[in-house]
Amino acid sequence: MHAMQYEITLPADHDMGVIRHRVATRGHLLDDFPGLGLKAYLMRERGEDSPVNQYAPFYLWTRPEGMNAFLWGSGFQGVVRDFGRPVVQHWTGLSYEEGPASSALPRSATRHRSPVPASLSPADAVEAALEESRRLARSPGAVASALAADPRHWELLHFTLWDHDAPAAPGERFQVLHLSRPEQDLIAKGRQW
């Protein structure tokens, strides 16, 4: 599994209805994309929960060929044409768990990125993060939870989909506008090694 996300930060006065319309009319285009486990079309609006207006799709890929086909094929070119070329962040998948609400359509998502302290061994940091990821996945209303790592920057990422408003927790909260999940059943459950 590979996790991927890009963030498009928009002006404070941007009409976020434009993003809602974009997802409503184009979101289905990846509903059968080969190699895509799931794509959460995420948005956050400037206000109480967010300092910015942002469109920030999050992907879990079942294999790198799917991610490459999207980035270098026609899929990503619409984003580049409409918004410019955003930085594409990506992480190696460490675990994936479906939650008690796995059959529900998610309404919100949380993303929490945290550095691995230099004073802690990477293996110990990952073990603690795996336990946290399992806890998140067991939470009431959790649809699915993934843990991933960026060893270049020694960063861990927790991503959780919820069937209700995202709980107050460390990290960022997003609205889920659409979920494409053509190969969700191919994402390996549990620890990825």
Image: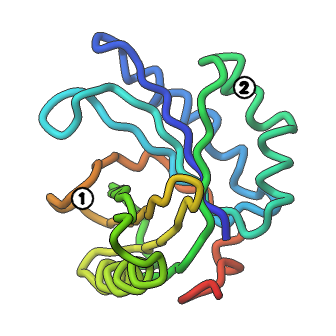
Residue 13 is tagged as none
Q: Amino acid at mark 1?
A: Ala
Residue 42 location, x and y as percent? 44, 44
Element type where label 2 sits in the image: helix
Q: Splitting the image into 4 quarters, where does residue 135 fall?
A: bottom left
Give percent across and percent down for residue 126: 44, 79
157 over 145 or under it: above or below = above
54 or 93, nearer to the observer: 93
Which colour scheme appears in the figure?
Answer: rainbow
Image quadrant holding the N terminus, namely bottom right
Going from N to C along the chain, the mark reached first, 2 or 1, is 2
Which residue is denoted by mark 2 in the rendering? 78
Quadrant position of residue 77? top right
What residue is drawn where x is 58% and y is 45%?
Answer: 89
Instruction: Give the residue type at disc 2.
Output: Gly
Placement of 63 over or under 111, stated as above or below = below
Quarter residue 120 falls in: bottom left
Residue at 54% in and 89% down = 190
Residue displayed at 44% across by 64% down: 156
* Vertical placement of residue 107 versus 63, above or below: above
Q: Is residue 107 visible?
A: no
Q: Which residue is mark 1?
A: 166
Q: Secondary structure at mark 1?
A: loop
Q: Residues within 10 Å of mark 1 (few under 14, many from 20)?
A: many
Q: Position of residue 193 (x, y in %)?
A: 65, 88
